Image (cartoon, coloured by chain):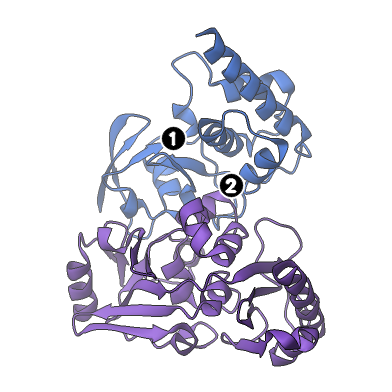
Chain colours: A purple, B blue
Amino acid sequence: MEVLTPRSLREALLVKADRPDAVAIQGGTDLMVALNFDRSRPATVLNLNEVAELRGWSRDNGTLRLGSALTYAEAMRSELAAELPALAEASRTVGSPQIRNRGTIGGNLATASPAGDALPPLHLESAEVECASVRGVRRVPLDEFVTGVKRTVLAPDELISAVWVTPSGASQTFMKVGPRNAMVIAVVSLALSAGEELRASFGSAGPRPVLVTAPRAEADTFAERVAAAASPIDDVRGSAVYRRHALRVLASRALERTMG
Amino acid sequence: MRVSLRVNGTEAEADCWEGESLLWALREQLGYPGSKNACEQGECGSCSVLFDGVLVCSCLVLAAQADGHEVTTIEGLADGDRLHPVQEAFLETGAVQCGFCTPGLVVAAAYLLERSPEPSDEEIREALSGNLCRCTGYEKIFAAVRLAARSQVGREGRG
């Protein structure tokens, strides 16, 4: 094994071009578990912790650029929470303070688990994933970025450099079902907004993000439509039947909360 | 690979395997066994340390990522022979049973009080939600954090 620690994005992209099999590590909350349990032995680990360009967030007119190294703890802080409230709520449900201090939005996207808590709130706001390589930079809509369970369109020479999102300003919320509030992988989760239209994106109830929309006038049937759009499976955390039921309940509650 | 870092204010160097966690380096290479190794997946918090002043699970930090950085472990909280107020409070309230989770909980509680000197009970619960204790039922631990907060505020009040 070899660990390479680039000091700039340019340097990181050169390494990734030269060694497309290099596995990127940022917060380590996914990869370290695989390493600790001998589930993974990558020949090359690309440590992105020292790449300053990936950190923090900035505003370009009305659009926000979230660096891929933005942590959940940072997404919870007030200035960004005011712009993306559902993302802040979702971030607060991730793991524990320790995990939120290390885990990143970029890592959540790269792992592309159906249970990834950052995905539904970002999807709700039509976020785009910025993929960078020595060939250039492209932006991919989040629902096109994730192609299946833990599968993305990220090319072997690419790294996730940022997420672009234009906050809608719509009343929005995030809810998650699990056995306790902390340290929970979502049994099912939901981000919902009630702006000019109703929008919802769920987690742990389908292989990839699905956006459900409806006119505000159809609020009465929206929870049912959200549940119908899901394609949940039975697994250790819950049954498909329970997940669909819970999603319907969450959607009703989220509508009350956002339209009330 | 060589990893150079500062542990509890002292320069340290470890010869690490590339896939090794910071926790392993601290315990097995650098002589800081206070951080405990239990779940190795960020679930239990018993390996909690401050990494550049931020609370993390050291089992989820690659040792190589600590190169050039600063780590504070449970061994670094006391000021010489004088225990940290959180440590004093754990003794005072009997918040320790088997003791395995204690280092992680003390580090997490110290981190909380540094950021929020007079936390509400809800804040305390949330701040310690990543630290598992299978003995105490947590009540004595919460009492310890409340006591540490009072004693810290009192100490500062006296100047």
In this view, the mark in front (1 or 2): 2
Residue type beneath disc 1 = Tyr
**Which element carries disc 2, helix, strand or loop?**
loop
Q: Mark 2 lies on which chain?
A: B
- Picture coordinates of residue B47, whole percent (x, y): 53, 44
In-image side of B62 versus A124 (left or right)? left
Does B49 appear above or below A149? above
Q: Distance between the residues labelled 1 and 2?
A: 16 Å
Crowding near the residue tagged with mark 1, few <14, some 14–19, many ≥20 C-alpha atoms within 10 Å: some
Q: Which residue is drawn at 62% across and 28% down?
A: B118
Q: Where is residue A21 in the image (x, y as percent from the top left)?
A: 30, 80
Q: Answer whether residue A1 is visible to the viewer in this image.
A: no
Q: In the rendered image of this protein, does residue A149 appear above or below residue A55? A: below
Residue for point 42% across, 69% down? A106
Which residue carries the number 1 mark?
Answer: B32
Quarter residue A154 falls in: bottom left
Horizontal relation, residue A91 to residue A216: left or right: left
* Rendered location of residue B119, percent (x, y): 64, 33
Tag 1 and tag 2 share a subunit: yes
| Amino acid type assigned to the residue bearing label 2 in the image | Gly
Q: Of the two numbered discs 1 and 2 on the same chain, state the one appearing first in sequence.
A: 1
Mark 2: few/some/many CA within 10 Å (<14, 14-19, 20+): many
Q: What element carries label 1?
A: loop
Which of the numbered marks, if any, corresponds to residue B45? 2
- Identify the residue at the far top of this view: B158
Q: Residue at x 58, y 44 (%)?
A: B46
Q: Residue A235 in the image: state x and y as whole percent.
A: 72, 80
